[in-house]
Amino acid sequence: MKNVLLPTDFSENSWNAIKYALELYKKTTCNFYLLHVTLIPYYTTGDYPIIPTSDILEKTILEQAKDALNKLMQKINKLPKNSKHHFYTLSSYDSFISAVKTHIEEKNIDLIIMGTKGASGLSEVIVGSNTGDLITKVKHPVLIVPEKAVYTIPKEIAFPTDYNIFYQPKILDSITELAKMYDATIRILHVAKKDEVLTDSQLENKEFLSNFFMDEKHSFHRITNKNIEEGVQCFIESRDINMIIMVAKNLNLFQRILFKPTVEEISYHIETPFLVLHE
């Protein structure tokens, strides 16, 4: 049984993420928790904030959130029914991150799936946003579904690394679990600068990955490009990659690929789902 948290702001982006989640786990028994977080408004007069009474909250904001969640459930119910899927609605008054952390613990959440809106690059919309906060402040697996992502069985999974980090077996187990679920191939990618030579430490980490994935379908790839984002984009296009997996522990590589696009041609931010794992 998988417990999946689906934060929603009722936008088309979040709806796309919900549909993607239902397809991704259509053969898996899941509890899906639809979470809408509303901040309690307050008004300032002079030096003192005035917070609306609980009666006003109940009659206005809370009811609006419940109505919107009910309408969302009606929309979901119009999709082909899957007896393996069970849905629950959650409405919280809190900061977004605090609410997510609370429900992760209370509902024993395995994965968070959230939509995001892309522009010329994720950095324009994700930094400082709920999604950006989620993947940097919550140490829990998060699948980011960009606005133009269309569900395709993830047969080709890219795993970018610079081999500078030793990945714990537990984190790699999450990758193999996903790969086995869809009989996918793991493409381990290193974007290198011209004439770059791996250090002894990097070679050791690469060898460890080779041994760990020995029984899985996998391959190692090296692309020469001084711009990591361009290298990743080229690889995704050439291999028809369906999903990218990143480990947040490798902050330099993680931020370069996810937060700092520098060229307009980078389209993986708005088309390719990102699975972010934390150690």
Image (cartoon, rainbow, N blue to C red):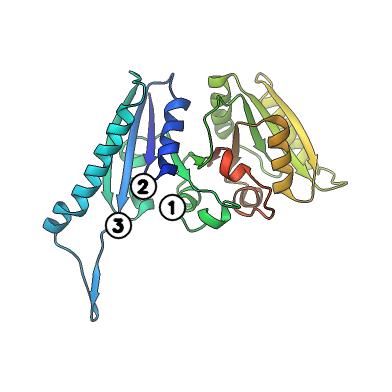
Check disc 1 and give the amino acid type. Asn
Q: Position of residue 193 (x, y in %)?
A: 81, 48
Q: Please report contact status of discs 1 and 2: CB closer than 8 Å, yes or no.
A: yes
Provide the residue designation for mark 1: 130
Up-down relation of residue 20 to residue 10 (above or below) = above
Q: From the viewer's perspective, tell me whether residue 78 is left or right of residue 226.
A: left
Provide the residue designation for mark 3: 39
Query: Real-space Cα distance between discs 1 and 2?
Result: 10 Å
Instruction: Name which of mark 3 and mark 1 comes first in the sequence.
Output: 3
Secondary structure state at the residue bearing disc 1:
helix
Choose mark 2 or mark 3, whichever is in front: 2
Residue 9 is labelled as 2
Q: Position of residue 238 (x, y in %)?
A: 73, 33
Q: Position of residue 175 (x, y in %)?
A: 57, 30
Check disc 2 and give the amino acid type. Asp
The N terminus - image quarter: top left
